[in-house]
Image: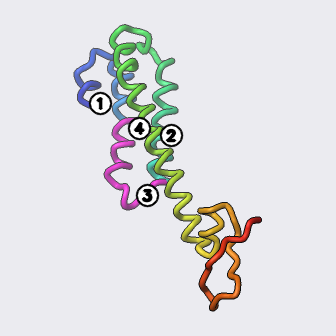
């Protein structure tokens, strides 16, 4: 996307603004080990908001800009969907690790109740 932007005929201010937004997001990808999924989610959200806002900037209605947006926005949407899916998965996994005593209940939707078994073993799932 950065290459397409660099090769485009957008007005210089708009091009610089869009370039900065994309570079900040790429930075969050490159520093994922530091910022984690939360940082990546926030960076994507900020970039998406600024990209949407940029459509009102000077030069954004010219054919070159409209062509760029037509290509870039679906890609950004797909990236956002992937990030939010990963974020939701990480959140669920984190909840399971945090509340590991309730894993059976989370997975099955039922409480786990041992019945006449040695401590710590579950042989039957009691309905709620």
Location of residue 77 (image quadrant): top left
Q: Residues within 10 Å of mark 3 (few under 14, many from 20)?
A: few
Measured in 3D between alpha carbons, the distance from the residue under mark 4 to the one under mark 2, in whole angstroms, is 11 Å
Look at the picture and state if 76 lies above or below 91.
above
- Magenta stretch bounds: 21-37
Disc with the residue nearer the chain's start (4 vs 3): 3
Magenta stretch, main secondary structure, is helix
Disc with the residue nearer the chain's start (1 vs 4): 1
Residue drawn at x 39%, y 13% as measured from the top left? 66
Measured in 3D between alpha carbons, the distance from the residue under mark 1 to the one under mark 4, in whole angstroms, is 12 Å
Furthest toward the top, the residue is: 63
Q: Residues within 10 Å of mark 1 (few under 14, many from 20)?
A: few
Write down the residue under mark 4: 79
Residue 36, disc: 3
Residue drawn at x 34%, y 28% as measured from the top left? 16
Location of residue 76 (image quadrant): top left
Quadrant in which the C terminus appears: bottom right
Write down the residue under mark 1: 1
Verify CB contact (< 8 Å) between mark 2 and mark 3.
no
Of badges 4 and 2, nearer the viewer stands 4
């Amino acid at each position: 996307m950065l290459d397409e932007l660099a090769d485009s005929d957008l007005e210089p201010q708009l091009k610089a603004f869009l370039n900065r937004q994309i570079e900040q997001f790429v930075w969050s990808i490159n520093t994922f080990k530091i910022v984690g999924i939360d940082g990546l989610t926030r960076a994507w959200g900020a970039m998406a908001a600024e990209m949407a806002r940029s459509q009102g900037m000077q030069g954004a209605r010219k054919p070159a800009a409209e062509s760029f947006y037509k290509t870039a926005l679906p890609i950004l949407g797909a990236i956002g969907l992937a990030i939010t899916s990963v974020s939701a998965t990480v959140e669920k996994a984190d909840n399971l690790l945090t509340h590991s005593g309730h894993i059976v209940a989370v997975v099955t939707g039922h409480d786990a109740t041992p019945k006449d078994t040695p401590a710590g073993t579950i042989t039957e799932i009691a309905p709620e």
